[in-house]
Image (spheres, rainbow, N blue to C red):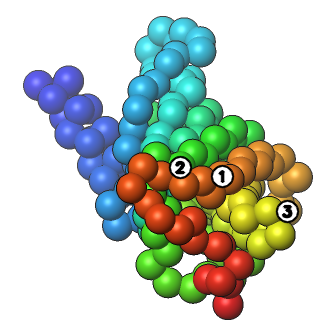
Amino acid sequence: MKRSKLLALISTAFLCFGAAPAFAQSGPDLIFRKSVDFKLLTPNDKLATYGIDDPTIEGVACYYTAHERGGVAGMFGVAEQSSEVSLACRQYAPIKFKEKFGQGDTAFSERRSLLFKRMHIVRGCDAKRNVLIYMVYSDKLVEGSPESSTSTVAIQPWAGQNEVPQCGEFLR
């Protein structure tokens, strides 16, 4: 009986404290997780790789790997996650711009701590080279982090595509 009460309490804590990261409407796709340590009674620390589609530019997907803390704080969703995130973005279909965008506009954002830290993936355009640039970084209410990662997508012609769109034409 005590065990079922403990499980109910833990489940309630997950719901109340938001154990899952706050994602965009559709959220990122979890590709896989890999444990990086062993904890006997609480969840292990993990590296998790996610995929997202750029909401403004069809044909571009970004993949990022982030550390997910385990332990007691991680179990209850209150652990502050690290700022180190790797990023890789690729063209997987013909590029189609849905709307104009500004340099440094947010393509994706998620919570990395209970209240104060967020991870952002922002996009820009190198109009001279027709290359999309994506950067991931974390910010914090009091103190940000210089940890960042950058990826580029050279806009290439795709099978059946007559003209290659120029990202500079879609900048605000």
Choose mark 3 or mark 1, whichever is in front: 1
**Residue 153 at x, y percent in the picture:** 65, 52
Question: Could you say which disc has been placed on residue 129 in the image?
Answer: none
Question: Could you say which disc has been placed on residue 143 in the image?
Answer: 3
Q: Does 134 appear above or below 142? A: above
Type of amino acid under label 2: Gln
Q: Quadrant of residue 23?
A: bottom left
Can I make out residue 18 in this image? no
Q: Does 170 appear above or below 137? A: below
Type of amino acid under label 1: Val
Q: Dot 1, crowdedness within 10 Å: few (<14), some or many (≥20)?
A: some
Q: Which residue is depicted at the point 59% across and 35% down?
A: 65
Mark 3 → mark 1, Cα distance in angstroms:
30 Å
Q: Are marks 1 and 2 in contact (CB under 8 Å)?
A: yes
Q: Secondary structure at mark 3?
A: loop
Question: Could you say which disc has been placed on residue 153 in the image?
Answer: 1
Q: Secondary structure at mark 1?
A: strand
- The foreground one among 72 and 4 is 72
Q: Earlier in the sequence, mark 3 or mark 1?
A: 3
Mark 1 → mark 2, Cα distance in angstroms:
6 Å
Type of amino acid under label 3: Glu
Q: Is 144 situated left or right of 138 in this image?
A: right
Q: Which residue is depicted at the point 83% across and 47% down?
A: 147
Q: Which residue is depicted at the point 50% across and 18% down?
A: 34
- The foreground one among 113 and 172 is 172
Q: Residue tagged by mark 2?
A: 91
Q: Is 58 situated left or right of 167 in this image?
A: left
Can I make out residue 33 in this image? yes
**Residue 106 at x, y percent in the picture:** 61, 71
Mark 2 → mark 3, Cα distance in angstroms:
34 Å
**Residue 96 at x, y percent in the picture:** 46, 69
Q: Which residue is depicted at the point 49% across and 74% down?
A: 97
